Image (tube, rainbow, N blue to C red):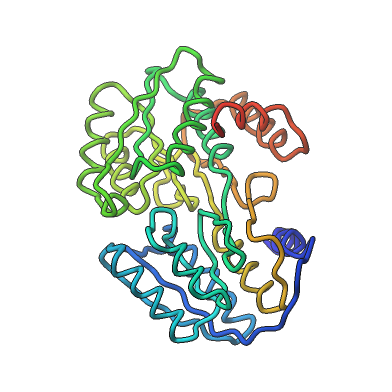
Amino acid sequence: MARLLIFILIIFSIKVSFAVNIELNPIVLYQGEMTRNSYLGLIENGIGRFERVTEIPIERVYLNERNYKNYTEELRKAALAGYNPIIVSDSNSLKGFSSIAEDFPATKFISLDTSYPIPNVLGLTFNHTEGSYVIGFISGLATMTNQVGFIGGLEIPIIKDFQCGYEFGVRKSNPSATVQVDYINNGIFSWDDLIAAKRLAEKQYSSGVDIIFPASGNASLAVLDEAKSRGLKAFGVDSDLSSIYPRTVLASMEKKVDVAVFAALMQIKNGIWNNNKKHFGIKQGVINIPLNPDAQGLSSDDVQLINELMLDLKGSNNPISHEISLQCEK
């Protein structure tokens, strides 16, 4: 973890366009349910680490119910109150965020998962297609029925990236396999809609699917619970969930948002503000695919193929990354 952080800090430090010491008064705005291993939980881990290292407190605003109007209002209140930087945990579907950022050019915003062509907004984005490709590759190797599934939260570009990478990976390792795709699509409540996620998982497993990749936020846990109850397989997302679902999770797509958030805050603290987008993937160690050592369903040959794939994706100018980009980043 220490080496990874040093590497990320170097990435943030190159090509500095201006460096100005600012007095930090940070705030983070959360929306939705937070659990220890969730996306929001990872953001909190990065923030907590920054507080411990720097002894700079970070204000927190919790909106337990997802409501983009309320979230936007809280963002504007935070900017008016002089908080700086403002960490926006839920900007990818947030209407009105751009206008708020433009209204407060002296305030720095850290936007998770989405970048904006606005000088005072630092977008931290992640290569979901590559990580999902590896998950799909594993699914194609492990399926016994040649039927695998994908359950997305909301049909938006970021989750479509997950879907595209996953489908491409399945086709690469097992051209005979089919992918059943469903979305919760319950608006802003999709990410916490455990009932809908369970219903879709029941439908897919009952139709012959034996492995599901959920990209549904907190609702993904309902898919894992359904897989566990049936003795079938699924994948963890955001965090490594193999210790919680030891007989269910084949692998997890880790998205180390905590590392990215911590590094961004440290760079702002040090007065560094370079280009306003940072993109992280397998090559940077922020996207990682840990296999569950206890999960059945993968042979030693399968594991070797997966390890070789991960090594390839960590290399420079590798053809697989190029293929994935051509397939999914249209």
Residue 81: horizontal and vertical position, in percent?
44, 86
Residue 293: horizontal and vertical position, in percent?
54, 41
247, above or below 97, in the image:
above
Q: Residue at x 37, y 18 (%)?
A: 145
Q: Residue at x 44, y 54 (%)?
A: 92
Q: Residue at x 40, y 18 (%)?
A: 178
Q: Toward which corner of the image does residue 65 lie, by quadrant? A: bottom left
Q: Nearer the viewer, residue 90 or 179?
A: 90
Residue 251: horizontal and vertical position, in percent?
50, 40
Q: Nearer the viewer, residue 64 or 22?
A: 22
Residue 2: horizontal and vertical position, in percent?
71, 64
Q: Toward which corner of the image does residue 10 lie, by quadrant? A: bottom right
Horizontally, residue 226 falls left or right of residue 139, namely left
Q: Quadrant of the N terminus?
A: bottom right
Horizontally, residue 60 falls left or right of residue 258, namely left
Q: Nearer the viewer, residue 329 or 310?
A: 329
40, above or below 226, in the image:
below
